[in-house]
Image (tube, helix red, strand yellow):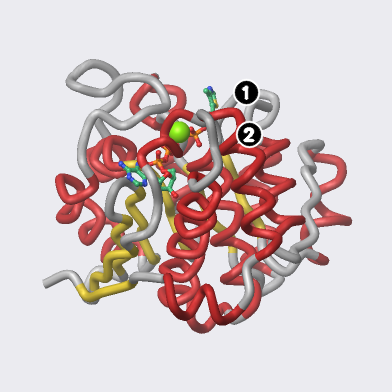
Amino acid sequence: MVSMDLMANTLLASGASPAMVHAAEEVGDFTPRVDALCVNVGTLSPEWLPSMKSAAEVAVGAGKPWVLDPVAVAASGFRMSACRDLLGLAPAVVRGNASEIIALASSHSIGGTHKGTDSTHASMDALEAAKTLARANCAIVAVSGAVNLITDGDRVVGAHNGVPMMQKITATGCAVTALIAAFVAVDPSHAFEATASALAVFGLAGELGMETAKGPASLRMNLIDSLHGLDESIVVSRVKIAPVP
Ligand SMILES: Nc1ncnc2c1ncn2[C@@H]1O[C@H](COP(=O)(O)OP(=O)(O)O)[C@@H](O)[C@H]1O
Ligand SMILES: Cc1ncsc1CCOP(=O)(O)O
Ligand SMILES: [Mg+2]
């Protein structure tokens, strides 16, 4: 509920066509017709979880890629168990911040250094957890942060675009996960490349938006405008994706 507006506007500004659908009664009709599905557990409730699981199953059955955002997975046992169940339903990509990826890989919820939806770790702290998750689930795993890490369990690249102020806007993580789903929809056979590209492009939109932003609220607006205004020459000249040794 927190993220739907920014996610939908991020997708529209990028040329994709979003629809936020929750009712279990709609999954059978709607999900087979999507090009990609994004499941986001941000404001998880027992009523919504069955729709999330059945949408993931329908997407996989229809040969459509789906992307998981394990928002605040360490916040409760309920959330961890939901995310572990969803992880078992063959997501093509999992994108979280470092704390979320570390928690999801270890299955430990509550306590420790984890807090709500924000990360208390740097993305590099989650590199081994991301590789382990990717290998165990045959998925691409992305860890967002100052450096965005993308791995298939073997290869690792870093997408170095973004500005720290993006952390001060709620739902930027959720929005980039939605953008990953849109990029993967274009070519599901290259989910690794699509995930790295989406993270770099979203970060670049943040960099361009920051040039005239006065703070988080104007950056939020500028970020959407910048995404909409991107063209090939600026993407090619400004995107920074490099192998991580
Ligand atoms: N310190 C940072 N420097 C530059 N960009 C950042 C930084 N932290 C986060 N970002 C960017 O903000 C977006 C959201 O990432 P993040 O804050 O890690 O997600 P979440 O909202 O899930 O915690 C990503 O595009 C990421 O690249
Ligand atoms: C604040 C909040 N509470 C539940 S979901 C949510 C949004 C989290 O979005 P993000 O992880 O992208 O910052
Ligand atoms: Mg955030």
- Give the quadrant of residue 109: top left
Q: Which residue is drawn at 47% across and 59% down?
A: 204
Left or right of 117, for residue 217:
right
Q: Give percent across and percent down for residue 223.
A: 60, 47
| Three-letter code for the amino acid on which mark 2 is drawn | Ser
Q: Which residue is drawn at 28% across and 61% down?
A: 136
* Residue neighbourhood size for the residue with mark 1, other residues' Cα within 10 Å, grouped as few (<14), some (14–19), many (≥20): few
Of 245 and 87, nearer the camera is: 245
Q: Residue at x 33, y 72 (%)?
A: 241
Q: In which quarter of the image is the C terminus?
A: bottom left
Q: Which residue lies furthest to the front in this view?
A: 212
Q: In this view, does 159 lie above or below 88?
A: below
Q: Residue at x 54, y 56 (%)?
A: 205
Tell whether label 2 touches label 1 (CB within 8 Å): no
The disc at residue 3 is 2
Q: Does the residue labelled 1 lie within 8 Å of ligand 2?
A: no
Ligand 3 position by quadrant: top left
Visible in this render: residue 90? no
The answer to which of marks 1 and 2 sits earlier in the sequence is 2
Visible in this render: residue 45? yes
Element carrying mark 1: loop
Q: Give percent across and percent down for residue 195.
A: 46, 67
Left or right of 27, for residue 1:
left
| Three-letter code for the amino acid on which mark 1 is drawn | Pro
Q: In this view, does 176 lie above or below 5?
A: below
Q: Does the residue labelled 2 lie within 8 Å of ligand 2?
A: yes
Q: Which residue was labeled with disc 1? A: 46
Element carrying mark 2: loop
